Image: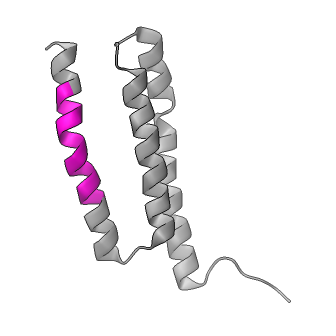
Amino acid sequence: MSSKVNNAQIQVNSPDDVRNVVLIGNAAGLGPIYYFGLTLAATLALHHLWLIRDRDRMRCFAAFRGNNLFGMAVFVGVALDYAVRTGAWPRWYA
């Protein structure tokens, strides 16, 4: 498989993945903090696509090393949105 086929697969599948994550957020009743986390994750994904565009070994490795930030952005968005909605955070003690 050539690298052009791989890039085409990424570009075709990505909109479906984003749509599914947004639909899951809507179904779970998640709010703006969640969507901010998704926006940050989408920005990181675009940066990763930019890094791997030429299939340079070191740039691909840099994208691989930064992949944990993508998951962290989604997780923090879900966790903070849930904490704020349930009143678990922030707790102000008087």
User: How many numbered discs, if any?
Assistant: 0
9 up-or-down from 51: above or below: below
14 up-or-down from 56: above or below: below
Q: Position of residue 53 (x, y in %)?
A: 34, 19
Magenta residue check for 77: no
Q: How is the image coloured?
A: one colour
22 up-or-down from 83: above or below: above
Magenta residue check for 18: yes
Residue at 26 percent of width and 66 percent of height: 23
Work out which residue is located at the far right of the displayed protein and give it.
94
Viewer-closest of 13 and 66: 13
Residue at 15 percent of width and 21 percent of height: 5
Residue at 13 percent of width and 14 percent of height: 1
Q: Position of residue 91 (x, y in %)?
A: 72, 81
Residue at 20 percent of width and 23 percent of height: 6
Q: Quadrant of residue 14?
A: top left
Using the rendered image of the protein, determine whether residue 19 is visible from the camera's viewpoint. Answer: yes
Q: Quadrant of residue 87?
A: bottom right
Using the rendered image of the protein, determine whether residue 78 is visible from the camera's viewpoint. Answer: no
The magenta segment: 8-21
Quadrant holding the C terminus: bottom right
Q: Position of residue 72 (x, y in %)?
A: 51, 49
50 up-or-down from 13: above or below: above
Give the main secondary structure of the magenta stretch: helix
